[in-house]
């Protein structure tokens, strides 16, 4: 009887403290996430320059975005181009380096440090450094090309080259993704490979039938995080290109920033934010929806 | 190779096969190390370029073909860069934000993580799931209403908008700490409860001391978050006396584009704390990142 009542009071105590301890986080969720999200949708239906009071204009902001604002399309194109060129390249190069590092190499810790290091560099310092590397007259890249008697590029100072240049910069900073892959690869049980060897699998087959399925969930994670992250690129535009040349690197968050904080168009910027949100959501959903076809989870075997 | 060769006896055949695999092995080893060394060089080169440029006089920077050894070493680039723009002030500002954010994040996120990992209450997992979905919410969506909120509270141009939200838990860190807390044996809690302890005591005196590595990871990540954040300070801090290091460097870039030697020195200064932290706590960086990916 006594023990039952202590168990009862323990569970009561647990749920009371559980709620109290989670309360700040839940409150934070309401104040910083849910509330602003709803508010931002509401603001997107208004015309609002910060100084005046908001005026309801229905879907006008969205109509303007899609039909009367060529800059929006440019910014959408620049962002999509950056994402769909950059994310696959970053994932592929990170995966290759992680695979190579997983071959029981000597000096693993040193190589891992070197490859990971660029991703701890603050975005601003990184942007300044690459501004200098991309300098067409005195920068590292054109100097190196000249050394091999190759023609130089204009890099971020050319409309057509700016996005590929920024992608190159993001590939250099792929260390974070690489470490996640490496952790995944190191988690693949060795006996799976041994079993495959006994069945006569060659290196390629082991890669195809053991490695890829076993880390497909890590690829999935990196893909989703990569899409969400690159769609929100900002510092490079703010520090390096100012969205140029000729708005060819006018990334969506930068365009949003300009609208909200330089032109004071809060309503229009909120509409832009929601379009960005829906696009990210769409692509994330596509990846999630496609995942059963190619992502393998350990627990599936048991069911 | 020639599979139709008939007359090879078994032992030489095996030897040849062995020789072939060892040659193949050696080639693949060479290939592996070439990729690694070449990749490392490409990765390190920009840093070498940065360092070289930061201790060169303006004239030498622009010499073509470029020279790698500064003649003379222009060490005064550093004091020059630090006085052209008041970086000391910016460091102090950033430090204040960093301290506020780290303490707030650690307390609020570990408290919530403890609740989600080790206390049973109705609706717990559903609420945790809800919190996690916000990791996918672009900050652009919440940016404008949040800004308007701070403006109405007349707290723009203070550190409050950058520090206070950290005191309400961050989903990513809650997730990370919860993962870690789940791995601590539950017998410890039960023993403490039998002795009449409260959950608050178990959280503070049993779990937190055991979770030090995870707390260090969270501190490092939040430090990096503050140090690297550009958009937040750009929006909330317009008074130059309140600038953070990141904003200071960005402004510097806008004003002194021609003075590459000073810009490079300033970039090194901004990089330095991160480099030091990285080499002191490298283990935690790697652990933390691995922890985030594994449960994706």
Image (cartoon, coloured by chain):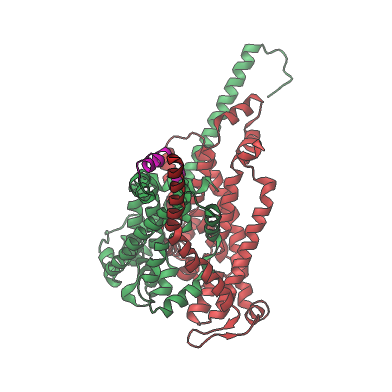
For chain B, the rendered hue is green
The image quarter containing residue B209 is top left
The image quarter containing residue A62 is bottom right
Q: Position of residue A219 (x, y in %)?
A: 59, 48
Q: Residue placed farthest to the right in the image?
A: B4
Q: Residue at x 68, y 24 (%)?
A: B1
Residue A55 visible at all? yes
**Magenta part of the chain:** B180-196
Q: Position of residue B203 (x, y in %)?
A: 37, 49
Q: Position of residue B109 (x, y in %)?
A: 42, 56
Q: Residue at x 45, y 60 (%)?
A: A23
Residue closest to the eye, B118 or A86: B118
Residue B289 visible at all? no
The answer to whether residue B39 is above or below residue B80 is above
Residue closest to the eye, B69 or A199: A199
The answer to whether residue B175 is above or below residue B76 is above
Residue closest to the eye, A66 or B158: B158
Tell whether B98 sits left or right of B22.
left
Q: Residue placed farthest to the bottom in the image?
A: A52
Q: Position of residue A276 (x, y in %)?
A: 59, 68
Q: Residue at x 68, y 47 (%)?
A: A292
Tell whether B76 sits left or right of A201.
left
For chain A, the rendered hue is red
Instruction: Residue B185: say if magenta.
Output: yes
The answer to whether residue A297 is above or below residue A88 is above
- Majority SS type along the magenta span: helix
Tell whether B278 sits left or right of A259.
left
Q: Residue at x 42, y 45 (%)?
A: A113
């Amino acid at each position: 009887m006594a023990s039952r009542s202590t168990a009862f009071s323990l569970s009561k105590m647990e749920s009371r403290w559980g709620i109290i301890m989670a309360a700040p986080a839940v409150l934070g969720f309401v104040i910083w996430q849910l509330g602003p999200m709803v508010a931002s949708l509401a603001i997107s239906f208004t015309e609002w320059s910060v100084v005046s009071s908001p005026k309801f204009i229905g879907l006008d902001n969205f109509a303007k975005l899609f039909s009367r604002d060529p800059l929006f399309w440019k910014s959408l194109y620049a962002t999509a181009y950056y994402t769909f060129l950059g994310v696959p390249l970053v994932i592929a190069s990170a995966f290759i380096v992680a695979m190579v590092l997983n071959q029981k190499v000597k000096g693993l810790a040193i190589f891992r440090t070197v490859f990971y290091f660029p991703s701890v560099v603050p975005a601003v310092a990184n942007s300044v450094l690459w501004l200098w590397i991309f300098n067409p007259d005195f920068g590292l890249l054109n100097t190196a090309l000249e050394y091999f008697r190759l023609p130089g590029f204009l890099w971020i100072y050319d409309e057509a080259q700016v996005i590929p240049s920024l992608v190159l910069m993001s590939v250099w900073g792929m260390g974070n993704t690489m470490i996640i892959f490496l952790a995944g690869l190191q988690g693949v049980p060795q006996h799976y490979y041994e079993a495959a060897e006994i069945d006569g699998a060659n290196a390629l087959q082991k890669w195809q039938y053991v490695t890829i399925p076993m880390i497909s969930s890590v690829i999935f994670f990196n893909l989703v995080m990569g899409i969400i992250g690159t769609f929100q690129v900002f510092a490079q535009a703010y520090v390096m290109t100012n969205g140029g040349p000729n708005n060819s690197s006018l990334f969506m968050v930068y365009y949003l920033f300009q609208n909200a904080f330089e032109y004071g168009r809060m309503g229009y910027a909120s509409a832009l934010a929601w379009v960005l949100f829906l696009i990210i959501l769409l692509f994330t959903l596509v990846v999630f929806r496609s995942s059963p076809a190619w992502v393998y989870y350990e627990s599936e075997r048991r069911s | 190779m020639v599979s139709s060769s008939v007359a090879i006896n078994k032992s030489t055949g095996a030897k040849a096969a062995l020789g072939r695999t060892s040659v193949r092995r050696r080639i693949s080893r060479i290939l592996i190390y070439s990729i690694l060394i070449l990749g490392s060089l490409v990765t390190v080169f920009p840093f070498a370029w940065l360092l070289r440029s930061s201790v060169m006089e303006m004239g030498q920077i622009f010499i073509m073909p470029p020279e790698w050894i500064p003649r003379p070493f222009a060490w005064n680039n550093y004091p020059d860069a630090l006085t052209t723009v008041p970086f000391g002030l910016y460091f102090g500002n950033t430090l204040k934000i960093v301290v506020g954010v780290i303490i707030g994040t650690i307390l609020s996120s570990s408290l919530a993580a403890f609740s989600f990992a080790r206390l049973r209450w109705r609706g717990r997992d559903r609420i945790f799931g809800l919190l996690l979905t916000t990791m996918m919410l672009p900050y652009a969506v919440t940016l404008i209403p949040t800004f308007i909120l701070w403006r109405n509270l007349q707290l723009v141009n203070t550190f409050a908008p950058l520090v206070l939200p950290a005191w309400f838990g961050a989903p990513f860190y809650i997730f990370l700490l919860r993962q870690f807390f789940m791995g601590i044996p539950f017998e410890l809690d039960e023993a403490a409860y039998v002795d009449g302890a409260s959950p608050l005591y178990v959280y503070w005196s049993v779990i937190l001391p055991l979770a030090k590595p995870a707390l260090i990871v969270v501190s490092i990540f939040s430090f990096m978050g503050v140090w690297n954040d550009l958009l937040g300070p750009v929006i909330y801090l317009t008074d130059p006396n309140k600038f953070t290091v990141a904003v200071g460097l960005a402004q510097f870039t806008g004003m002194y584009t021609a003075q590459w030697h000073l810009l490079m020195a300033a970039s090194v200064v901004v990089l330095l704390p991160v480099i030091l932290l990285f080499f002191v706590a490298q283990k935690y960086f790697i652990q933390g990142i691995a922890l985030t990916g594994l449960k994706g």
